[in-house]
Amino acid sequence: MSTTLLDVTAARSRFTALQRRLAFFDGPGGTQVPDEVIDAIAHYLRHDNANVGAPYETSRRTTALVELAHTRAGEFLGCSGDEVAFGQSMTSLNFLLTRALARELNAGDEVLVTKLDHDGNVAPWLELQEDLGIVVRSVEINADLSLDYDDLASKLSDRTRVVAFPVAANSVGTAPDVGRIVELAHSVGALAWADAVHFGPHGQIDVSAWDVDVLLCSPYKFYGPHMGIAYGKESVIGPWRPYKVRPAADDPVGHRYELGTCQHELLAGLVAAFDYIDSLGWDAMISHERSLGQRFLDGLPEGIDLYGLPTMEGRVPTFCFNVPGRTSEEVATHLADTYEVAVWWGNYYAIETMRALGLDEWMGAVRAGFVHYNTEEEVDRLLAGLKELL
Ligand SMILES: Cc1ncc(COP(=O)(O)O)c(C=O)c1O
C-alpha cells in the first residue's frame, strides 16, 4: 500500500491564521480555517446574498448553493443529501432530533451513553429522563480509557432504545470500535446514535458502511465554519414528527430539522472546506497526523501523567495529560506564554471521563490535539515545554 505524503508547508500556506509562530494544538476546540473557506463566505455575501426560492439571479444561486451543500455533505458523510440537516451546532441539532424521537419513547425506555461522551451526546438524554422518565445508563471505560464493550453488552436489554456514543472522544482521543457498538445496539433493536464531532478532522466518516442511524458532526472542527450537521437514516427518522413550522416543506427528510433560514454564507464556506479536504486527501492527512502523534508519544518525558491509550492504535492524536504538582491551567498558560503553544485546560464537557479519571471536574487536564497542519517542530516545542515544566 502506498502512503501519500502531505506537503505540510503547502497546506499551511493556504491559511493566513497559520502564518505565525503560535502552534495551534487547539483543533479539538475548533480548527483554523483556510483562506479559501473565508473567501467563499465573503464571496457569497458580496455576490449571491438572498433567500431561497425567488425568481431572480441571487436567489437562484442561493437555491443552487443550498442544494449543492446538501449533496456535498451527503458525499462527505456517505449518505444522500436528503438525509442531511444543517443547523447552528451539533448540540442544538441533537436536542432537536432527540426531542423528535422522544415522541416515540415511553417511561422506562432505556438509553445508553458512554463515559467517553461529550455532554452534547449525554445532556439531551438526561433532559428526557427528567421529562419522560426514560432511564439513561452510562457505559464504563477500562483503565486505558478504551470502551468497556462487555459492560455495554451487559447493559443492553429489550428496553434499550438508543446507544449514544462518540466516534472519537474529544477529551482523551479514544476512537471506539464503531462497527462493534452498532452491531451491539442493533442486536436489541436499539438505534446507534453517533457523535462524530471530534472524529471529523481525523478521517472519513461513512454512515452507510458504519450503519449508524443518526450521526452528528460540526464543520468548525474540520476547517469549516461554525455550524452543525446531522445525518438521519431516512427509514429511521422519516416516521418521527419533527418540531417545525407548518409552511416549511416536509421533504426532503433532513429539511424537517432545519428550522428557519439556513446560514447560506456558511454553506458556501462548508463547500469550500470539503474542497480543501478533497484537495489533500484523507490518506495524506491521516498519515501525517498519526506520525505527529507517534512523535509526541515517543518523546513524552517520563513523569507526565498521560490519560488514555499510550499508542496510536485505537485513538486519534488528541492527548490529555497533567504535569504532577501543577494545575492544568498553569501548564497551559506557561506553554502559551513561554513556548507559543496553544493548548487547552479543563474538562472539555466530558464530565464523566473526568470523574472516571478522578480529576477535578473544573480543572480537568491539559489537552493537545494534532491535526494535519501541525508540524514536527511544533510537537517538539510542546515536548520541550513539558520537559521544562517537570
Ligand atoms: C465530541 C464533541 N461532541 C459534541 C460537541 C459539541 O459540538 P457543537 O459545538 O457543534 O455543539 C463537541 C464540541 O467540542 C465535541 O467535541
Image: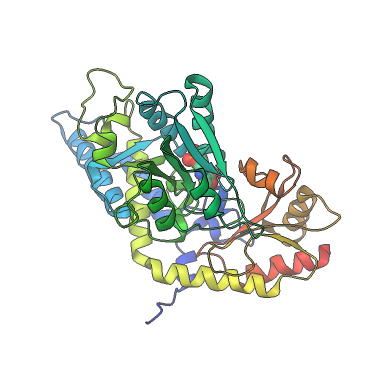
Q: Quadrant of residue 41?
A: top left
Residues 384 and 363: in front is: 363
**Residue 226 shows up from this direction:** no
Please say if 335 is above or below 231. Answer: below
Give the residue at the far top of this rendering: 246
- The residue located at (45%, 74%) in the rendering is 7
Residues 251 and 129: in front is: 129
Quadrant containing the N terminus in the rendered view: bottom left
The percent position of residue 280, horizontal first and vertical second, equals 38, 67
- The residue located at (27%, 54%) in the rendering is 75
In this rendering, position of residue 308 left or right of residue 32: right
The percent position of residue 220, horizontal first and vertical second, equals 46, 47
- The residue located at (68%, 47%) in the rendering is 356
**Residue 384 shows up from this direction:** yes
In this rendering, position of residue 222 left or right of residue 368: left
The percent position of residue 174, horizontal first and vertical second, equals 56, 58
Q: Quadrant of residue 341?
A: bottom right
